[in-house]
Image (cartoon, helix red, strand yellow):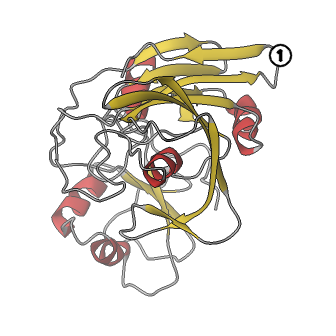
Amino acid sequence: MVQLQPPPLPIVDGVAPSYLWLPIGSWPNLLAFLEQRFPAIDSATWIARMARGEVADGDGVRLTPDSPYRRGACIFYYRELEAETPIPFEASILYQDERILVVDKPHFLPVIPAGRFLHETLLVRLKKETGLAHLTPIHRLDRETAGVVIFSHDVASRGAYQSLFQQRLVDKTYEALAPTRPELTLPLVYRSRMVEGTPFFRMQEVAGEANSETRIELIEQRETSSLYRLHPLTGKKHQLRVHLAALGIPIINDAFYPEVYPCKGDDWSAPLKLLAREIAFIDPLDGRRRHFASQRKL
């Protein structure tokens, strides 16, 4: 379903309200539903939020604990985190015009709020820094990956830029540090069929028609680890990480592939050696060739 526009609650400290469509079910009031839907949040917290006017319906009417539960309605509220570990790395803005914002993202910084990250995300940081209320990423990078990310801040032109990625009209170049494998003949194009794996956050390769494709080149061969250039022709989750692991050259410091390693929490000492180096495309509005490159090094 499409989010109502504009949201009835304002952006606060760079954070836009979250929203939820009320599912089929029967609860005596809205508070009873929220207690069941979000068991980690106690009723006193919801009551306090409602008293501050921080829970509203799509028309902007502030809701109370006794508000009736109406399935199919959309409610808005703010996510809150008890404590959020500061991420000690900063993004830099590479380019900005009236439609897009291009950013060089550091390792470890998530692009959008999720899980235990809210204020310590690229999107929220940029909203605070720029004051651009309609800022939205038009593609994503994993939290572990550094490099170029493009944002839209103009609602009218957003769809045109999103369609570039959907239609694979964007040239993306990555770099990775991975083990040296002299017997591997490069360049090569690697294809496989990728599906969701186990645990839930991993992808896996299975038999069948390929749905992922990556061109892999050697930039510099070193004694134990080498620098590779990667051109993903498709955009599957973790595609580059899966493909290099399958070739016997897993990206250095990859905690997911080929094996899952214990979570290191907020240990910043071993970033994934993967960088979104360049993005290039023909601008859908003015026909100019756009090219943006990361200033970071692996």
Give the residue displayed 51% in from the left and 77% down from the top.
23
Identified by mark 1, the residue type is: Asp
Measured from the top left, where is residue 242 in percent x and y?
Answer: 47, 52
The residue lying toward the viewer, choosing from 174 and 268, is 174
Measured from the top left, where is residue 262 in percent x and y?
Answer: 18, 57
**Can see residue 14?**
no
Give the residue displayed 31% in from the left and 42% down from the top.
118
Q: Residue furthest bottom?
A: 26
The residue lying toward the viewer, choosing from 6 and 1, is 1
The residue lying toward the viewer, choosing from 57 and 282, is 282
Please determine whether, in this image, residue 1 is positioned above or below residue 135.
Answer: below
The residue lying toward the viewer, choosing from 59 and 183, is 183
Q: To which residue does mark 1 refer? A: 286
Q: Residues within 10 Å of mark 1 (few under 14, many from 20)?
A: few
Please determine whether, in this image, residue 87 is positioned above or below residue 293.
Answer: below
Q: How many marks?
A: 1
Where on the picture, by quarter, is residue 128? top left
Q: Assign the N terminus to one quadrant of the image.
A: bottom right
Give the residue displayed 35% in from the left and 76% down from the top.
33
**Please, what secondary structure does the residue beneath circle 1 have?**
loop
